[in-house]
Image (cartoon, rainbow, N blue to C red):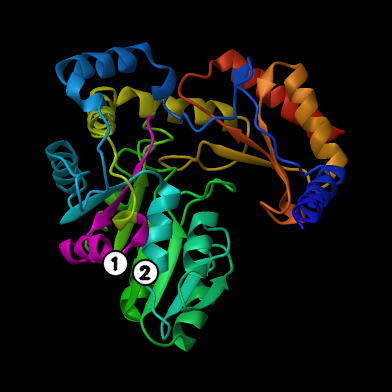
Amino acid sequence: MLPDLLSNLQQELDDREERGLLRTLSLKKDGIDFCSNDYLGFARSQDFRRKLLANLQHSPQSLQGSTGSRLITGNSEALMELEAYLAQVHQVESALIFPSGFNANLSLFSVLPKKEDTLLLDEKVHRSVFEGSRLSNAKRWKFRHNDLNHLEELLKKSTGRVWVAVESLYSMNGDFAALVEMVGLCSRYSAALIVDEAHAIGTFGLGLVNYYGLQEQVFATVVTYGKAMGQSGAAVLGSKTLIQYLINYSPSFIYSTGLPDFHALFIRSAYEFLEENEFLRKELQRKIRKFHQDENKELRQWLSPIIPIYIPEDDKLSQAHNFLREQGIISYPVKSPTVAKEEQMLRVILHSFNTEREIDLLKACIIKIQDE
């Protein structure tokens, strides 16, 4: 039986490879970074590294493992102090740390919606939200991306408690959710709005929920630290009741080993570094405007660093990716099934550390790709 099983698995892998969709692990490549989520350059910053090392030297005991789940032996003053700090900084009642944004979303969407409830998911919300939702018994409907009219149609038909899930800044398309309008709709229909801020935290200060002052209207916010904040991990922000509920009912929290103290130390350091280096966010916006400066469009107060270059054809997408690589540019081709076939793209990320010369090179290459 085992050889047959392995043969079946290998056949699936072979089929995926034939279609050019096989995923493999590789080390970081040398070149101009227009690919990573290191929006503000924290992960490459020598100043940030020195700050982390200095803080670590004052707390060498934080390198030790937590020894168990947080409900047994894995809790610590460092983790609880970090959560209190996050609640204070984000102006919410409480916060709970998770090892990743995926884990945080899995926790929220697997335990909050019940069988009689309705989940309304933006069709482009992160896969972790869909995976968490699949673990609940709630009815699940997708609404068209950023379509408030379609969302309202579904809100009118929803039964039980209603949950709405969006990203504030979408990781693939790079566009923004209409958070203010969504808060209004959810309030009108007594729906609970959950916002994933993975790509907005740091990139836009404390995120867009904070920017618009919507903390009291948003039921739960997920912030992650593996992107602009240069670390890893995540936090769920919300009411004390929500956090206590997750502590009591979320298997992914209850049965996971607690994070070591250095993780809390580094996340706190990232917030401090963000506050000390506000110019990096302004520099990022300057670089984004540099990229868009030749386009005849009205520039808003802030723009997205995520730029999709849509190339639906498999061969042309591969050619474009290889062409950029030949020019020393690191990008990422996003293929089906991660996105719909017609939305396959080169996902380009702008950073505060990209030079103007690099941006000019990127623009010239994109023009060449689009002309061919």
Using the image, determine if residue 4 lies above or below residue 303.
below
Q: Which of marks 2 and 1 precedes in the sequence?
A: 2
Give the x, y percent position of residue 42: 39, 23
Which residue is under mark 2?
Answer: 111
Q: Is residue 196 visible?
A: no
| Residue 67 vs residue 141, the one in the foreground | 67
Left or right for 18, reference 239? right
Q: Is residue 268 left or right of residue 129?
A: left
SS assignment at label 1: helix
Q: How many marks?
A: 2
Viewer-proximal residue among 121 and 59: 59
Residue 125 — which label? none
Which residues are drawn in magenta?
A: 231-252
Q: Which residue is identified by label 1?
A: 249
- Percent x, y of residue 218: 29, 63
Residue 250, visible in the rendered structure: yes
Query: Do the numbered discs 1 and 2 sit on residues whose CB atoms are within 8 Å?
Result: yes
Task: Give whichever of 289, 221 is nearer the camera.
Answer: 221
Q: Magenta includes 26? A: no
Q: Residue drawn 70% across and 16% down?
A: 328
The residue sitting at 35% across, 52% down in the picture is 222
User: At 77% across and 18% down in the image, what residue appears?
Assistant: 326
